[in-house]
Amino acid sequence: MSPSSRDPGSPRPGSAGPTEATGPAEQTGAETRGGGEGRLRVKFLSLAAGIAVAALVVLVLPDSLSTEGKMTAGVAALMAVWWATEAIPLPATALVPLVLFPILTGAEIGDVSAPYASDTIFLFMGGFMLALAMQRWNLHRRIALTIVAAVGTSPTMLIAGFMIASGFITMWVSNTSTAVMMLPIGVAVIGMVAQLRDGKTDPNFATALMLGIAYSSSIGSVATLIGTPPNALMAAYLAEEQGIRIGFGQWMMVGLPLAAVFLVIAWFVLTKVVFPPAIKKLEGGRELIRGELRAMGPASTAEKLVLLVFVCAAAAWVGIPLLAEGPVGAALPWLAQISDAGIAMTVAVVLFIIPAGGGRRTRLLDWDTAVQLPWGILLLFGGGLSLSAQFSDTGLSEWIGQMVGGLAGIPVWLLVLIVAALVLLLTELTSNTATAATFLPVMGGVAVGMNMDVMVLIVPAIIAATMAFMLPVGTPPNAIVFGSGHVTIQQMMRGGLILNLVALVLIMALMYTIAGQVLGFTL
């Protein structure tokens, strides 16, 4: 589960952590104050820029758009600038609709606040709680080590094992947590390789392994609706604004093949094209991974129970919609009333109920653990959905559609390519959740104006929003492996540029193959 390209409330990737922020002991107080004043000045300018851009948008929009529509466009511009520059924390910007829409558009506060309690938000909340339970009992680490040990321990296969493990874990757990968990294991393997080579590290092996962890942590997250916030935002927007429902299993039929193919290509690019390891055989690799597994000891009762809940949840998300559509659904009509969010909340409650076992006087999930879920992401969801709702309610989406009606002559494939490329560029620099929240209503309006299914533009934009490979600031996994010292920015850009181009090709191929068949649209 990928909370965001930058987790709200966390330090900005690539920025100084607590130690670096204080600086060396000899740093003067004046220098510290100077740096702080500089950052405050940038924040102030970002705040002012957002307000100025919002005012400009309201002033230049024609009278063919209603006053409420102009105000909504201005608020959208303000939020886009503040999200892009992080003038205030991302979740704080997501609260802006609650403040401005009732004042500027006359919307009822109940209508503006309703999207903050969307069922998709509860789907993600339940997914977060399941992920926290896995992390609490180290189940995710055991799964990852088991996968790595099973795949093989030659240099290239070891990298494949790390990428498969990261890709699978990030389908359910945040990409940040996945990368943080896999990094020390990867660094230990790199150190072992250096010992086997008389203290000499294989630079290509180290770089490919680190980038493999980062890239697969992003790629795997597109496979499920709870894997990354843009996916969930898309599902909520389509359901609430377009009346189109995408089920958990339905999306997996689209996202999982894409993630699987992309992982294979990413592995090939890293290990065969860009950073082929110099060593061809790695003695002792399997023993190291198995040693890590042995150090964990036998699986605890709590681990086994969380695994059981996890398997049941995945089976329910995929299986219940399929059963509801067949003969079983005819015999049990109440199955159709079970939603993905309902399953997620059931899982969360069950985790609070089941004892951890093993003599522990606790449950699989307690509140001290649950409160660690990224509440800021849920606010981001709400803010994005509230903004989208106002686009529809004020007629702004319809107006955008009318304005772009002249683009109807552009080939659909070219428009899809332009949208995907633009989002790919933006997501390298800004939060993927904020990018998705900003683009969703705009893409919806453009699609309506061009008389095409809204999913034709929204699906490629949402997938592209998760594909940040070139810069450390693009997504936390990139920043995490960059901090290991085994990857330079030039190396990340070199590998990331190729994968961005691959992402464009795969998105186009997906749209013309299984996406349309599964999601029910035609190009």
Image (cartoon, helix red, strand yellow):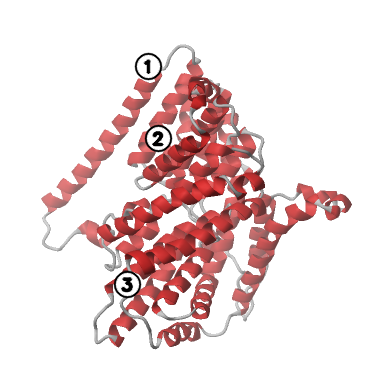
- 460, 399: nearer the viewer: 460
Q: Counting residues from the N terminus, which is met first, the one under dot 3 or under dot 2?
A: 2
The secondary element bearing badge 1 is classed as helix
The secondary element bearing badge 2 is classed as helix
Amino acid on which disc 2 is placed: Ala
Q: Position of residue 393 (x, y in %)?
A: 58, 24
- Label 3 vs label 2: CA separation? 37 Å
Q: Position of residue 425 (x, y in %)?
A: 37, 44
- Label 1 vs label 2: CA separation? 17 Å
Task: Determine the residue positioned at 54% across, 73% down.
Answer: 143
- The mark found on residue 206 in the picture is 3
- The mark found on residue 396 in the picture is none
Q: Counting residues from the N terminus, which is met first, the one under dot 1 or under dot 3?
A: 1
Horizontally, residue 36 falls left or right of residue 173, namely left
Q: Position of residue 223 (x, y in %)?
A: 56, 56
- Label 1 vs label 3: CA separation? 54 Å
Q: Nearer the viewer, mark 3 or mark 2?
A: 3
Task: Determine the residue positioned at 41% across, 60% down.
Answer: 215
Q: Nearer the viewer, mark 1 or mark 3?
A: 3
Q: Residues within 10 Å of mark 1 (few under 14, many from 20)?
A: few
- The mark found on residue 80 in the picture is 2
The secondary element bearing badge 3 is classed as helix
Q: Counting residues from the N terminus, which is met first, the one under dot 1 or under dot 2?
A: 1
Task: Determine the residue positioned at 21% across, 58% down.
Answer: 22
Amino acid on which disc 3 is placed: Ala
Q: Residues within 10 Å of mark 2 (few under 14, many from 20)?
A: many
